Image (spheres, rainbow, N blue to C red):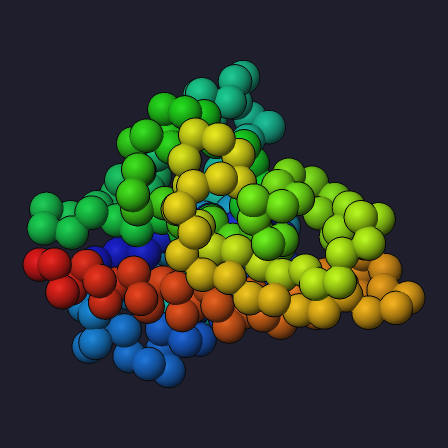
Amino acid sequence: MKNIVILISGGGSNMVAIVKRAQREAWSDKFGARVAAVIGNKADAKGLQFARDHGIVTEVLDHRSFTSREAFDDALAQVIDRYENLSHPVLVVLAGFMRILSPGFVNRYGGRLLNIHPSLLPAFAGLHTHQRAIDAGCKVAGATVHLVTAELDHGPILAQAVVPILQGDTPETLAARVLTQEHLIYPSAIADYLRGELRRS
Ligand code: GRF
């Protein structure tokens, strides 16, 4: 069985969408894959309870107890690698994981580390994306699922969704509109990724 490990920092609504889709579409039968663990870098990350309630193992690794980014990333990799098995490398899914990852970590999981960013990349990488899109007078915004590379919010694009920016939008109203699309494209992009892997094997 191929293990998917999801990393979260907060609400975890993307993780919930992925777990629900994996169950509804029986990814274990279809792709031989399952969400094996959800890891949070904050003990109070809301999504952890949802994962536990759905029988998924959860782990908490608080970045504040580490003296450097690299030390935290090394410990994180050790936890993730527990879900590795011989025939199937683990798939690492960042879902609202609010940490910049070190190059060592990114290289280690190269090609199997996915992220979602709430903008139409390469536009508005980084923070405050919704405010910046509104300030720039954009008529549309959106979300992007991409493979993670060493450069923040860059890397090959796997899926995108577009939403309108409406008169009077605030960062909050726009974020909510974008988030509903994230919940659709992230599970679909992961399913496509798993389908592609199956085809190649
Ligand atoms: C999402 O908009 C995600 O793209 C961004 O942070 C938000 C997290 O949402 N990185 P959630 O934790 O999945 O609810």
Residue closer to the observer: 119 or 103: 119
Name which quarter of the figure residue 71 lies in: top left
Depth check: give the residue in front, 143 or 107.
143
Q: Nearer the viewer, residue 46 or 161?
A: 161
* Furthest-top residue in this view: 67
Q: Quadrant of residue 46?
A: bottom right
Q: Is residue 44 visible?
A: yes
The vertical placement of 135 against 55, above or below, is above
The answer to whether residue 185 is above or below residue 4 is below
Q: Residue 158: percent from the left, percent from the top?
A: 40, 56
Instruction: Say which of 157 and 177 sits in front.
Output: 157
Q: Position of residue 119 (x, y in %)?
A: 62, 53
122 left or right of 70? right
Picture residue at 45% right of the left edge, 25% below the top: 102
Q: Position of residue 79 (x, y in %)?
A: 34, 39
Q: Position of residue 87 (x, y in %)?
A: 9, 50
Q: Quadrant of the C terminus?
A: bottom left
State whether residue 78 appears in this view.
no
Query: In the image, what residue occupies the spot 20% across and 47% down?
Result: 89
Side of 177 relative to 157 (left or right): right
Image-based side of 95 in relation to 89, left or right:
right
In this figure, what is the number of numbered marks?
0
> Which quadrant of the rendered structure holds the N terminus?
bottom left
31 sits to left or right of 48: left
Q: Residue at x 66, y 65 (%)?
A: 178
